[in-house]
Image: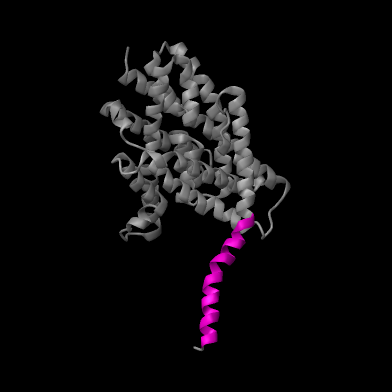
Amino acid sequence: MTTAHHLAHAHSSLTAPLRGAARLLPGVLLSATVGAAAYGLQLIETALFGHPWVEGLVIAILMGAALRLIWTPSGLWTPGIAFSAKTLLEVAVALLGATVSGAAVMALGPVMLLAIMGVVALAILGGYALGRAFGLPPAMALLVACGNAICGNSAIATVAPVIEAEGEDVAAAIGFTAVLGILVVLLVPVVGALMGFDATRVGVLAGLTVYAVPQVLAAAAPAGMLAVQTGAVVKLVRVLMLGPVCLVLGLMRSGKAEGARRPRLHHMAPWFIIVFLILMGLRSAGLIPEVVLPPLQAGVTSMTLIAMAALGLMVDPKAVVRAGPRVAAVAALSALLIGALALATIVLILPG
C-alpha cells in the first residue's frame, strides 16, 4: 500500500466517527429540545402546586408524540431520534445504579422486605395475566405490569429495551399508567383515612401503590413526616426490584432465543443492567463519593428526558389509539390489584 493510500485510510478512520456524530446530531438536538420544554413545564407545575402532578418524563413523551402526530420526521432526523430512544436511555439506566444505596432498605426488617418483594412479584404476574387475557401482546402486557408493580414510567422505560418493546407500546403504557398514577396519589390519603391507618401504615400504602417517588411523598404528606419517610423507603425497595426483574426478563428472553444452550452473562442481562447492579454495589459499599451524586443524578434525568422525547417522536399515533381501550382497562385493573395486595400486606404484617 502506498503512502497516499495510508494517508487516505488514516483520514477515513479519523473522520468516520465525526460523520457518525454529525448524522446523529439533528435528531438528538430535536429530542433534547422537546425534553427541555417538558422539564420547563414540570418546573412551572412545581412553582404552582409545590410538586409536579405530571412528571417531566410523561410530558416529554406526550409532547414528542403530539409533534409526531402533526409531523413525520424525515431521514435527516431519524438516526439521532433512534439513538436517543435506545442508546442514550441505556446509558441513563446504567448510571442510575450509582444513585441507589441499599443502606436504608435494611431498616425495614426482613418480614416487610420479603412482603414488598412478594407484592411486586404478584403484581407483575397478575398484571401480565390480565394483559394477556385482554388480548395485549406479550411485550405490552409486560410493560404495563412492570410499570404498575415497580415505578411507573421509569420501570416501563427501563424494561422496554430489555424486552425490545416497540416505541408505540412504550408510549401507550406510559401514557395510561401516568394518568392512573395521579389518581392513586389522590386516593391514598382518602383510603388511609377511611381505613383508620396511622402514619406508618399510610406510608406503607403510599410506598406500595404510588408509581413515582415525588408522587409517593405527595400521597403520604397529609399523614405527616413519618408517613413520608416510611413511604420513601418502601418505594425505594420497589425501585430496587427493577434490577432483578430485568435480569429475570433478560434470562427468559435469552433462553427462548438460544434454546438449551447455557446463556452467557451478557446474554442473561443487557450491559446496562449489569452496570446498574455493579454501580449500586459500589455505592452501597461507599466507594462512590457523595459529591459526584448530584451531577450524576442530573445527568441521568437529562438523558432520560431526551430519551422519552425521542420515544414519543417514534410513536405511530394510530397504533396507540388502536391499543388504547384495552391498555386502559388492563392498567386500571392492575392498579386495583396492587392496591388490594398492599392492603393485605398492611393488615397481615402491621395489624392493629
Name the spot of residue 317 as percent of width and height, x first. 66, 45
Asked whether the viewer can see residue 166, the reply is: yes
The residue stretch that appears in magenta:
3-26
Please tell me which residue lies in front, 311 or 306.
306
| Residue lying furthest right | 70
| Residue lying furthest front | 291
Asked whether the viewer can see residue 202, the reply is: no
Please tell me which residue lies in front, 303 or 211.
303
State the residue at coordinates (57%, 55%). Answer: 82
State the residue at coordinates (51%, 86%). Answer: 3
Name the spot of residue 145 as percent of width and height, x first. 46, 37
State the residue at coordinates (39%, 51%). Answer: 250
Q: How is the image coloured?
A: one colour
Please tell me which residue lies in front, 222 or 260.
222
Q: Quadrant of the C terminus?
A: top left
When the figure is inspected, residue 185 is found, relative to residue 274, above or below; the finding is above
When the figure is inspected, residue 31 is found, relative to residue 99, above or below; the finding is below
Q: Could you tell me what secondary structure mostly forms the magenta stretch?
A: helix
Horizontally, residue 186 falls left or right of residue 110, namely: right
On whether residue 22 falls in the magenta region, the answer is: yes
| Residue lying furthest left | 110
Q: Quadrant of residue 171?
A: top right
On whether residue 251 falls in the magenta region, the answer is: no
